[in-house]
């Protein structure tokens, strides 16, 4: 009896094709190896070569330039559209800090009008124009989107007035707490400030300052001490501070016409000595008897000259 043998050839039909593909892969892999035994990265080399080509850089630059141009033109047209639209039109203006100046003056100087576009409004130029007002020390302008403008004005605070000689004669100017001359005195403005007289004012004008040393500086220092609010000799009670080349500072009070000779230097010490003396005289109600007060003779002694109220009457009786 003939023994049965199975035929496996029909199950091995695909094997030769698989082997051929495997062999071809090995040949290709072996062909890509260099002398050092490393695999040459064919894809990476090709990428580097492509990047190094002049044509690739040129195309990239052209695309970048076109993109920048498109964005710039689009932004310009967008800005033009917003400036013509009513979205950012000014509808509300707030002006704060005005005391000697008026709101309309500030708006006129800054060319601030209802309906202007906040996008095209030049804040720096408006600030410069408003600061040209003699009473304006500084100004801050803030945009509140979409249609509000806030203007905060800081004015000078006068400390005293000073006579300045110029081509028009002797003109009164205000000085602030830092000694800066800032505005000419107008008859319609507040005149309730002491006056510094007798100092050299040649070359002084609005924008200049009192010298740091010398008789003018002593007068300014005396007024600064009075401005601290002492109840006996406050700033409001001082009428004039005269600078004399021979006698130094001479102070005149508003309610009492007698002169107070302060002398030179030691302004702070002599100011508080004057406060103690006047406090005692006010308490005893003897201020009306004062003819003059001399603080320029001795360092630790004050001379008070008194008026003799009945002297003239006695003289008439003896004649």
Image (cartoon, rainbow, N blue to C red):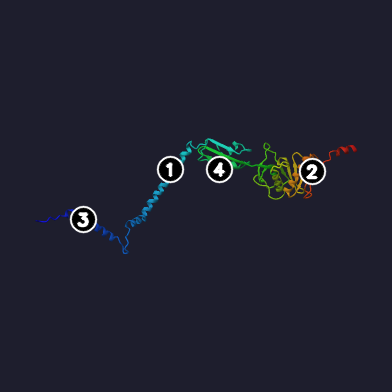
Q: Nearer the viewer, mark 4 or mark 2?
A: 2
Q: Which residue is denoted by mark 1 in the rendering?
A: 74
Left or right of 277, for residue 90: left
Is residue 168 visible in the rendered image? The answer is: no
- Residue at the limit of the structure toward the front, as seen here: 1
Q: Secondary structure at mark 1?
A: helix
Choose the circle earlier in sequence order: 4 or 1: 1
Residue 223 lies, in percent from the top left, at: 70, 44
Q: Which residue is denoted by mark 4 in the rendering?
A: 125
Q: Nearer the viewer, mark 2 or mark 3?
A: 3
Q: Nearer the viewer, mark 3 or mark 4?
A: 3
Q: Secondary structure at mark 2?
A: strand
Q: Secondary structure at mark 4?
A: helix
CA gap between label 1 and label 2 equals 82 Å
Q: Which residue is denoted by mark 3 in the rendering?
A: 15
Specify few, some or many for label 1: CA neighbours under 10 Å numbering under 14, 14-19, or 20 or more: few
Q: Which residue is denoted by mark 2 in the rendering?
A: 292
Left or right of 198, for residue 123: left
Q: Residue at x 73, y 48 (%)?
A: 269
CA gap between label 2 and label 3 equals 135 Å
Q: Residue at x 42, y 46 (%)?
A: 69
Residue 121 lies, in percent from the top left, at: 52, 40
Choose the circle earlier in sequence order: 3 or 4: 3
Residue 158 lies, in percent from the top left, at: 67, 42
Q: Is residue 32 above or below residue 209?
A: below
The N terminus: image quadrant: bottom left
Q: Residue at x 43, y 45 (%)?
A: 71
Specify few, some or many for label 3: CA neighbours under 10 Å numbering under 14, 14-19, or 20 or more: few
Q: Residue at x 26, y 59 (%)?
A: 26
């Amino acid at each position: 009896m003939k023994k049965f043998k199975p035929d496996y050839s029909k199950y091995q039909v695909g094997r030769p094709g698989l082997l051929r593909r495997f062999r071809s892969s090995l040949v290709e892999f072996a062909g890509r190896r260099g002398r050092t035994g490393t695999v040459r990265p064919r894809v990476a080399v090709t990428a580097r070569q492509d990047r190094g080509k002049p044509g690739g850089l040129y195309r990239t630059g052209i695309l970048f330039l076109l993109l920048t141009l498109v964005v710039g033109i689009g932004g310009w047209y967008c800005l033009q559209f917003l400036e013509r639209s009513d979205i950012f039109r000014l509808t509300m203006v707030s002006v704060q800090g005005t005391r000697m100046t008026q709101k309309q003056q500030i708006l006129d100087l800054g060319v601030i009008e209802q309906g202007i576009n906040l996008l095209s409004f030049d804040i720096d130029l408006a600030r410069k124009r408003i600061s040209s007002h003699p009473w304006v020390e500084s100004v801050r302008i803030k945009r509140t989107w979409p249609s509000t403008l806030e203007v905060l004005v800081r004015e000078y605070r006068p400390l005293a007035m000073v006579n300045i000689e110029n081509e028009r004669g002797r003109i009164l100017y205000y000085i602030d707490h830092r000694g800066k001359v800032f505005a000419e005195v107008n008859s319609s403005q507040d005149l309730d400030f002491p006056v510094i007289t007798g100092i050299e004012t040649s070359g002084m004008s609005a924008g200049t300052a009192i010298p740091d040393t010398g008789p003018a500086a002593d007068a300014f220092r005396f007024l600064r001490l009075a401005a601290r609010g002492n109840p006996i000799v406050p700033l409001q009670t001082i009428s004039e501070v005269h600078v004399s080349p021979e006698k130094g500072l001479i102070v005149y009070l508003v309610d009492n016409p007698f002169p107070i000779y302060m002398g030179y230097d030691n302004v702070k010490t002599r100011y508080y000595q004057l406060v103690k003396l006047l406090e005692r005289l006010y308490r005893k109600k003897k201020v009306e008897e004062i003819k003059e007060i001399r603080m320029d003779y001795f360092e630790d002694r004050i001379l008070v000259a008194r008026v003799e109220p009945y002297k003239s009457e006695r003289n008439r009786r003896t004649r």
